[in-house]
Structures are given as C-alpha cells and as structure tokens.
Image (tube, grey):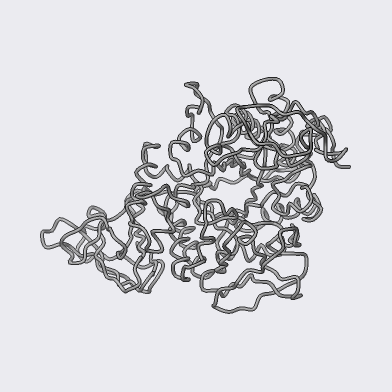
Amino acid sequence: MTPQWVRDLDLTPIPHKTYFSTLREWREEFIYFLMVDRFHDDEPRTPTLRPDRSGGVPTPDDFYGGTLRGITSQLDYIAGLGCTTIWLSPVFENNAGAYHGYNINNYLAVDPHFGTKQDLLDLVQAAHDRNPPIRVVLDVVINHSGDNWFYADGGEKLYSNDQRYEFGGWRRPDRPIPLDLRDPHLYHRQGSISSQSGWDTYPELQHGDVTVLKDYANDDDDHGSTVINALIKAHCYWIREADVDGFRVDAVKHMGELASSRFSSGVREYAYSLGKRGFFLFGEAASPSDDLYDRYIGPNTSASDNQTVYFGLDSLLDFRLAEGQGVGREALRDVILGQAWPAALFDRLERQRLRALNRGELGRYLVTFIDNHDSFWQPNGRISHGATDEQVIGAIGYLLCALGTPCIYYGTEQGFEGHGGDNQMREAMFDKAQPGVNLLNTDCRIYRGIAAIAAVMRSTPPLRFGRMYFRPISGDGMSFGLPYGFAYTLAFSRILYGREVLVAYNVSDSPRSDAIVVDASLHAAAGDTMSYLVGAPGSLPVQTTPDGQTRFVRPNLAPHQFVVLQ
C-alpha cells in the first residue's frame, strides 16, 4: 500500500540489500536528460537507420505515452551514445495534464502515466547492472508544490509587497501526499511572482508562487521545519526503495538558504548511511549570474545577510555557459555558430578559475549543457535549429572535453529542431500513429559523432581531470594570439601530470589550417608528434617557430570540424 503520511515511511535499510556505490567521480559522467513522457513507450519499436537527422514527433501539450519501461528497453541506445548517467524528468504523481512532472500532488507514488513503483526500481537496477554501470538521477521539486489548492475567491493572485492572501481550499480531498503537507500554514500564500525582475529579487523570488505552483513556507521557523523535514523523508524514501544516485533540485534560487542546506545535507547523510557514496545533488538556479553561483557552490555566503550558509549542493547547471550574459559574455552556442567572439568563453574560464586553487578541480562544480526543455532562456529553441550537424557535434564535443559535467538533452543527438515554446522543444522520440517505429537512430551522423568523442573522453584521463587552457593560434606560424572575430580555430588543452590533450574546432564556414600553441615543455623532443584521437587518421608533427620559443601543431580542418589530439 502506498504510504500516506511521513510516519508511514520505513527508512531503515532494506535487509540484505547492498546499495549501489561507485568510485567514478561526477565530473567523469556524461548525463542524458530525458523527458519520461516523450522518450519511449512500452511498445517494441525500432528506428530506420540512416545518416540524416530526424524531426521529433510533435505532441499535444499533455501526456503522450512515454513510460519508465520504455526507457529500460532502450538502455543500449543511451549507453551507445556514451552516456553514463540518466537524468529523469520528475516521475512522481502529477496533476492533470502535467506530463513534464513539475506539478506534483503525491511525492510517495510514481505517476501512473509513467508506470509503477516497480517499473522505477527495475529501471534503476537494470541501469546499475550494466558494464559500465549507468547512474540514475531523479528531478525533484521541493521549492513548491503542485497546484493543489486555491486562494479564497478562487482567482489567481499576484505577489505584492509580501502580502499574504487567504487560503481557499484543497482541490482534492486526498492530496497532497504526504498528508503532512495538508496545512495552509505550510505555504507562503503570497501570489505568483508578478514581474520579470521578481524572479531575481528578494523577497519576491523566495516567497512568490511559480505561476500556479504553490510556494512552500520553507523559512527558518516551525512551519518551515515541518515542510523541509517532510520533504527530506519523502525523498529519502526513494533513495531507500529505488537506490537512485542523485537529485537534480529544481528552482533552488527560489528556496530559502536554510531550506536548501537542510534538504541537501539531510539527503546526503541518509545516502551515506546506506553506503551510497557520492550521492549527487545539483541545482537549477536558472540564471547566468556568476555572483549567484558563488553563493551556492561550497561554503558560501547567503543572499540576504553576512551569515555563512552551506547550501549543500555539489554543483549547479551552468546557465552562464548555455544562456550567456549579454555582450562579451555570450553563450557557448553563439560562439560555436560563429555569431559571437570567443572572448565570452575565455571570460567564462577565468570566472571559474577564481573559485578554485587548481584548474583541474573546476569541473566538479558545474553541470554544462547547450539546450534543455525550457523556452524562457532559449528563444531560438534547440541548438539544432539553425545549426549544421557538424556544429551540433562541435557544441556537444566542447561540453565533453571542457571542464564540467557534460549533459545532453534527449533528441539533440538526432538533430531535433524544436523551437517556439516549451512543448515544441519536448518532442517525442516515438510516434503513436506509427506502430513499431521510433527515432532512436544509431546511424545518425550526430549520434555517431558524439559517441566517438564520448568514447575518447571516457578513455582519456586529461579530458576528465586535467587543467584547461585556451590556446593562442597563428596564421603565419610566427605571431600568436588568442582568436577573435567570427572565423578562427577555437582550441584548448587539458593537461594532467605531464600529458597534454589538444581540442580544436573550426568555427568558420571555410577550411582552416591555423597553427595552435602546445606546451613546449611537454613537446620538447625533436620529431615529436601529436596523434588524432578524433577527427582524422594519423598524426601531426610538432613544429617550432623560427625564434625557437613556441611549439605548435597545424591541423587542416574542414568547415566546423572538431578534432582531438594527444
């Protein structure tokens, strides 16, 4: 029977069960983020194998039919791409039509549209049983509940100077679950965030509802403790039952500092008590602000005063890299597409460098991505909308080889081009009107290109642990400098204990053969070469400038070609 109250939860370890743990660090992972409802259904399906990209299947703004068993049946596809972690969109029971999972009414049950609790357990076990094992991360929503109650007059309210509105009533007599949350005092009741600035302005960002989703009163008081303790235990229940490996924490910038700290620390301690080391907690701050990130990563200072608060998160989604922050700090996609100067990426690395004593350790703190399921930050839609196959491969290749934990959004590997609104970027990978057919095409050029780079990352330690340095280039092999403009070779090295791996991408629409600086101390020997790991057969000679001061290689790159050498 599904538990109804927090007191019904058994959080003692399951007898004789060995919980999953691995020594693999999270910066070594390649995360595959999928929408459960849109990835695959229960039907046996196979793709038409071909090199061309596919258009995702348009869907109604409602549940379409993807299931947990559908994911389990396609683990070979995810592993074949090189992914080692699956991030599931929220799987708990949702209100009507909320196929995306962020409108939760029951934290203690799997949404029946997706399957059963046992289906989730089976998926995690099947993922863990692979060689190498695949980790599974759940998307969790603890800043707000679903639209489970209404205001007194039945209408929507807007935030206004922290005014509290009268509670109206519950939309269902048996929700939300756990029933401990059926107390009006556990919600701020201050209406929806009312302006664009309110999404980033205290106290509105922490006290306002996220549209119709009702904000928890997770403050530092008795009611806040009741809320956060209930949510900690509800989510520990799923660690116990399903043996999941981490949580992506939704909307963390809207939570109180202490609530984030208590939830993250409580969950991590519980995972440790089960023998699960390295339980991963990464947050969605939905902002490109480095100043905001600095408050969340490590023992940083809270937003509201000089008190030091440990938020407890291991990492944040790097919206700074994906979304950009205005002129001079453009997004990665703009650079890859030749629409912005590369100085944005140089600045990004420098901002990261300020957070750590060692360049190689920076990769622990951010989950990097190029597109995802939300339209508010990407008005042009998915990266593939307006990009060639080679540019998409270059974008994901950059994530795989640069600092951070790389994450790919499902369908990007097939060239899905969704744009417009949220639902348009959440295409299905199967068509209910075509039995037996899906779009999980392993012969797609983009899929194969990404898989090749991921395999090299997996087998090449500097790409997972090494320090990162952007490299100067030269046209004449004598005068070197960091690139600028819109046509150049973007190059960086990852260096780990005497071993250099060079990554290069031709941003331009024309072939290029720029000379690229390499570490002179590591390539001092006469006749030294660097071999291609990705992009071409053979090797390149390491050359020396006429003054004998600089060592370089000169790859011949096709338009938008991505290569890796060591």
Question: Which residue is at the front of the view, 94 or 42?
Answer: 94
Question: Which residue is at the front of the view, 487 or 269?
Answer: 487
Position of residue 51 relative to residue 89, above or below, is: below
The quarter of the displayed image where residue 241 is located: top right
Position of residue 145 relative to residue 98, above or below, is: above
Q: Position of residue 236 (x, y in %)?
A: 71, 37
Q: Residue at x 25, y 68 (%)?
A: 541
Q: Position of residue 423 (x, y in %)?
A: 65, 59
The quarter of the displayed image where residue 183 is located: top right
Q: Would residue 309 be found to the left or right of residue 341 on screen?
A: right
Position of residue 138 relative to residue 548, above or below, is: above
Considering the image in quadrants, where does the C terminus appear? bottom left
Number of marks drawn: 0
Q: Residue at x 33, y 60 (%)?
A: 490
Q: Position of residue 368 (x, y in %)?
A: 49, 51
Q: Would residue 41 be found to the left or right of residue 329 on screen?
A: right
Considering the image in quadrants, where does the N terminus appear? top right
Q: Position of residue 437 (x, y in %)?
A: 71, 75
Q: Residue at x 77, y 69 (%)?
A: 43
Q: Would residue 5 be found to the left or right of residue 349 on screen?
A: right
